[in-house]
């Protein structure tokens, strides 16, 4: 089984990586939306280099072809992305794969793809994006882990430093954070809190 670092921040611009990865982040996702393809590529390339320099894992959200072109190691796909992604090509390129799940049908579909991790969300209400799913609740993490004990489980959605211990107690292997860092008045201090609590 793949072992993931327990803290997994997700950022929408490479500037965040430049600023925060040097603090000790070892797993980070770049989720870039509504940006021209050339700019996406430039950001992913810069993110790849930052992560390489600091011994961190970069997970590329969605842009699997660009991830392959740039020699990245990981890609994350949502359920909609799965409809069009070429998983054979992704695997042949040696990329590891993370997948989003929200209900049991999606979990079964994700597990059939033999992912290197699955993410369950939103565990708590999230302000990040409009979603058709209401909060899943901490108990669902335990259910997912029982269903897929050998696949690393990422808790995402409304997660904070204060809520992370509950997610770990519910059997999450890893906790993803977005706005808890980016909307914090002192993102650097918040990342240090995350790193401390995630050990």
Image (tube, grey):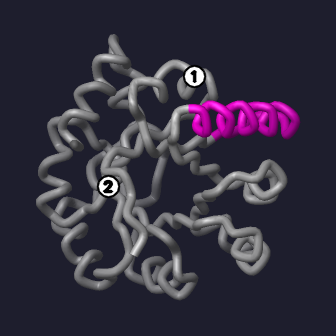
**Which residue is drawn at the image coordinates 29% and 23% (left, top)?**
190
The residue that disc 1 covers is: 18
Magenta-tinted stretch: 32-53
Residue at the spot 60% in from the left edge and 21% down from the top edge: 15
Q: Is mark 2 on a helix, strand or loop?
A: strand
User: Relative to 69, does residue 171 appear above or below in the rendering?
Assistant: below
Q: In the depicted view, which residue is nearer to us: 128 or 193?
A: 193
Would you call the spot at circle 2 few (<14 residues within 10 Å), some (14-19), or many (20 or more)? many
Q: Which numbered disc covers residue 99?
A: none
**Vertical comparison of 185 with 48: above or below:** above
Q: Where is residue 159 in the image (x, y as percent from the top left)?
A: 28, 43
- Quadrant holding the C terminus: top left
Residue at position x 58%, y 37% in the image: 51
Residue 142 picture quarter? bottom left
Quadrant containing the N terminus is bottom left
Residue 91 is left or right of residue 187, and the answer is right
Is 40 colored magenta in this rendering? yes
Q: Name the residue under label 2.
A: 174
């Amino acid at each position: 089984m793949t072992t993931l670092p327990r803290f997994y921040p997700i950022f929408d611009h490479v500037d965040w990586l430049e600023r925060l990865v040097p603090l000790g982040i070892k797993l980070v996702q770049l989720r870039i939306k509504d940006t021209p393809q050339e700019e996406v590529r430039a950001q992913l390339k810069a993110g790849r280099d930052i992560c390489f320099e600091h011994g961190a894992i970069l997970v590329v959200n969605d842009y699997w072809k660009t991830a392959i072109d740039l020699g990245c190691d990981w890609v994350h796909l949502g359920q909609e992305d799965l409809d069009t992604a070429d998983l054979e090509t992704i695997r042949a390129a040696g990329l590891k794969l993370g997948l989003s799940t929200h209900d049991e049908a999606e979990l079964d579909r994700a597990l059939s793809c033999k992912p290197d991790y699955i993410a369950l969300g939103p565990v708590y209400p999230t302000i990040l994006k409009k979603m058709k799913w209401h909060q899943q609740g901490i108990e669902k993490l335990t259910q997912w882990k029982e269903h897929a004990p050998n696949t690393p489980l990422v808790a995402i959605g409304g997660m904070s430093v204060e809520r992370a211990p509950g997610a770990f107690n519910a059997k999450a292997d890893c906790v993803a954070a977005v706005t808890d860092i980016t909307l914090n008045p002192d993102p650097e201090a918040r990342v240090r809190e995350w790193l401390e609590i995630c050990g």
